[in-house]
Image (tube, rainbow, N blue to C red):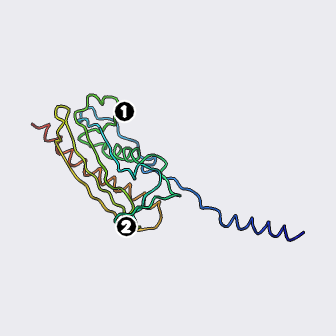
Amino acid sequence: MKTPFILLLTLLLYACSSAPPGISYYVLDGPGQPMSAINSNAATVTLASLTLPDYLRQDGLVMQLGPNQLHMSDRHYWAQSMSAGIESVLLKQLNGDNASFQLLSVTDPGVLQSQYQLHIQFFHLLIEQQNAVRLQASYWLTGNDNPSPVLHGHSDISLELTDDGYPHAVAKMHQTLIRFSQQISEDLGTLITENKTH
């Protein structure tokens, strides 16, 4: 009679020891400093389009294993879409207190009166074999009266990973987006300021 009990106990212990690890969820932009109030005197720019590659339009975090090989995690997921997370970071970073323009989402009031449209295309935003986080993107600005770009820029940002694990990598992704926002802010701010003086 003891043998079946011992066998059952052994199976239960084995099942507990081989249980799959938990699933983790991440956000690119967590709660923090609220967005600044809209400056009515600043030029308005609408984030008209934000394009991501197909591999970033799924839930698993992505790591590059080789030049042409990507790994999609089955235990580490985004809690929101990448496009929503990126847009949230950009809106907070580009709408600082001293900004020379105000960035609006397509759902913001007053978007129809916006003077410029910002278009962003991401080529990569991923972890590179536990060594770095890489952001590659292109952006351009158009005006209401001219569909041709009045400004065009490229960004290639790489930040070294100094710790292991996905939480650290996600924090580095957030930092790359902050740097990307700074580059956009400088380029757009210069153009908009020059246009105001003419």
Q: In the drawing, what numbered circle is on residue 115?
A: none
Residue 48 % position (x, y): 29, 38
Give the quadrant of residue 197.
top left
How far from the left and from the top, in percent, is residue 60? 47, 54
Q: Is 103 or 61 nearer to us in this picture?
A: 61
Question: Quadrant where the N terminus lies?
Answer: bottom right
Task: Say left or right for 132 vs 186.
Answer: right
x and y, in percent, of residue 128 in the image = 38, 64
Q: Nearer the viewer, residue 137 or 169?
A: 137
Residue at x 88%, y 70% (from the top left corner)? 2
- 27 over 142 or under it: above or below: below
User: Eyeballing the image, is 81 above or below 155?
Assistant: above
Residue at mark 2: 66
Classify 63 as above or below 183.
below
Q: CA distance from mark 2 to mark 1?
A: 39 Å
Q: Residue furthest right?
A: 1
Label 2, secondary structure: give it: strand
Position of 182 relative to 118 (above/below): below
- Which residue type does callout 2 highlight? Gly
Q: Which quadrant holds the C terminus?
A: top left
Q: Are marks 2 and 1 in contact (CB under 8 Å)?
A: no
Give left or right: position of 78 versus 95: right
Q: Secondary structure at mark 1?
A: loop
**In which image quadrant can residue 104 be found?**
top left
Residue type at mark 1?
Answer: Thr
Q: Position of residue 52 (x, y in %)?
A: 35, 48
Earlier in the chain: of badge 2 and badge 1, it is 2
Residue sitting at x 38%, y 54%: 174
Q: What residue sits right under mark 1 in the picture?
A: 107
CA neighbours of label 1 inside 10 A, class few (<14), some (14 to 19), many (20+): few
